[in-house]
Amino acid sequence: MNKNLTLLANMAKIDLLVENPLTLQSKQLTGYPTLRRIKSGEYRIIYQINNDILEILVLRIGKRNDAEVYRQLGHLV
């Protein structure tokens, strides 16, 4: 997939999160009770929902098979 299509696919997933963050199939990240992830092709979008002020923080986007997306998450929360 070319970079522009990948970017558009990731943005579409983020738009869906904004519309309703609980409708997408997401998983809680082990060891990070406030973080969740969703799939976007071969990419993963790591995010956090702050219900108090209804905001979604997208913390990282990276390839699933490149563990970089999961490294150093402790610095982000």
Image (tube, helix red, strand yellow):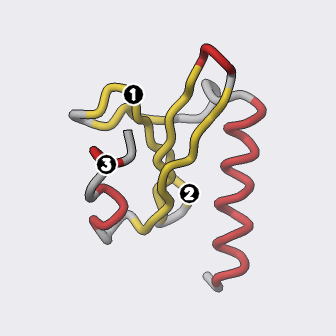
**Residue 50 x %, y %:** 56, 24
Q: Name the N-terminal-most of marks 1 and 3.
A: 1
Label 1 to label 3: alpha-carbon separation = 13 Å
Few, some or many residues within 10 Å of mark 2 (<14, 14–19, 20+):
many
Q: Is residue 24 left or right of residue 71?
A: right
Q: Amino acid at mark 3?
A: His
**Residue 24 x %, y %:** 60, 34
Label 2 SS: strand
Q: Amino acid at mark 2?
A: Ser
Q: Residue at x 56, y 47 (%)?
A: 58
Label 1 SS: strand
Q: Residue furthest top?
A: 52
Q: Name the N-terminal-most of marks 2 and 3.
A: 2
State whether residue 3 is above or below residue 72: below
Task: Identify the residue position indicated by label 1 in the image.
Answer: 34
Task: Identify the residue position indicated by label 2 in the image.
Answer: 40
Q: Is residue 65 left or right of residue 8?
A: left
Q: Residue furthest bottom?
A: 2
Q: Residue furthest front?
A: 75
Few, some or many residues within 10 Å of mark 3 (<14, 14–19, 20+):
few
Nearer to us: label 2 or label 3:
3
Q: Name the N-terminal-most of marks 1 and 2.
A: 1
Q: Residue at x 40, y 35 (%)?
A: 35
Q: Residue at x 45, y 65 (%)?
A: 62
Task: Identify the residue position indicated by label 3 in the image.
Answer: 75
